[in-house]
Amino acid sequence: MRDINQIIVHCSATPPSMIVGADDIRKWHITRGWSDIGYHYVIRRNGVTEAGRDIEKAGAHAKGHNEDSIGICLIGGIDEVGKPDDNYTLLQYNELLRLINFLKITFPIKLLKGHRDLPGVTKACPCFDVDAWYKFETQLTF
Ligand SMILES: [Zn+2]
């Protein structure tokens, strides 16, 4: 098993009206020439988590941080005209919290980051402050 010590949260950069999931993202990523979907988990608009890439394999979601991380993708993150937008459903937020807490007791996770919080990243992904959200929800810090 590889060393896993951080969780990185992403978005699919799709508008709320677009109902997609892990199978769709897998197709998009394979079209790019990747071997599989880049994320380990996808949280759909209805709050259902779908498995992406095998957790034992490094993902392809955050350059320079794939070897030791788990990538979670929330479906949504842009508005209908393509601007970054924190538009996730309450079901998605609740599921994200459950999934993070599950992973935290399963792996020695030391860091929780939004994609945009990584050094050198200029994207808005996942379009909300993951650190502040987690602290607010749990009163805990990583
Ligand atoms: Zn991302």
Image (spheres, grey):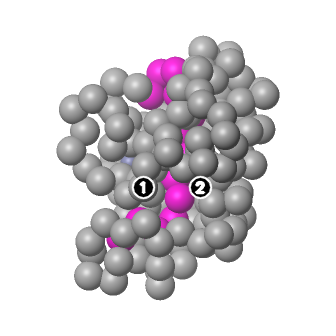
Q: Position of residue 43 (x, y in %)?
A: 62, 59
> On screen, 138 above or below 59?
below
- Callout 2 amino acid: Val
Q: Position of residue 94 (x, y in %)?
A: 70, 59
32 sits to left or right of 2: left
- Point out the stretch of residues depicted in magenta: 66-78
53 sits to left or right of 36: right
Could you say whether the residue bearing mark 1 is in a helix, strand or loop? loop
Residue under the image location 67 percent in, 73 percent down? 46
Crowding around mark 2 (Cα neighbors within 10 Å: few <14, some 14 to 19, many 20+) is many
Q: CA distance from mark 2 to mark 1?
A: 17 Å
Residue under the image location 54 percent in, 78 percent down? 19
Query: 42 or 130: nearer the eye?
Result: 130
104 sits to left or right of 60: right
Query: 121 or 22: nearer the eye?
Result: 121
The reply to whether the magenta stretch includes residue 77 is: yes
Residue on which disc 2 sits? 42
Indicate which disc, 2 or 1, sits on the residue closer to the N terminus.
2
Could you say whether the residue bearing mark 2 is in a helix, strand or loop? strand
21 sits to left or right of 130: right
Residue 128 disc label = 1
Q: Quadrant of residue 7?
A: top right
Residue under the image location 33 percent in, 43 percent down? 116
Q: Tell me if residue 130 can be seen.
A: yes
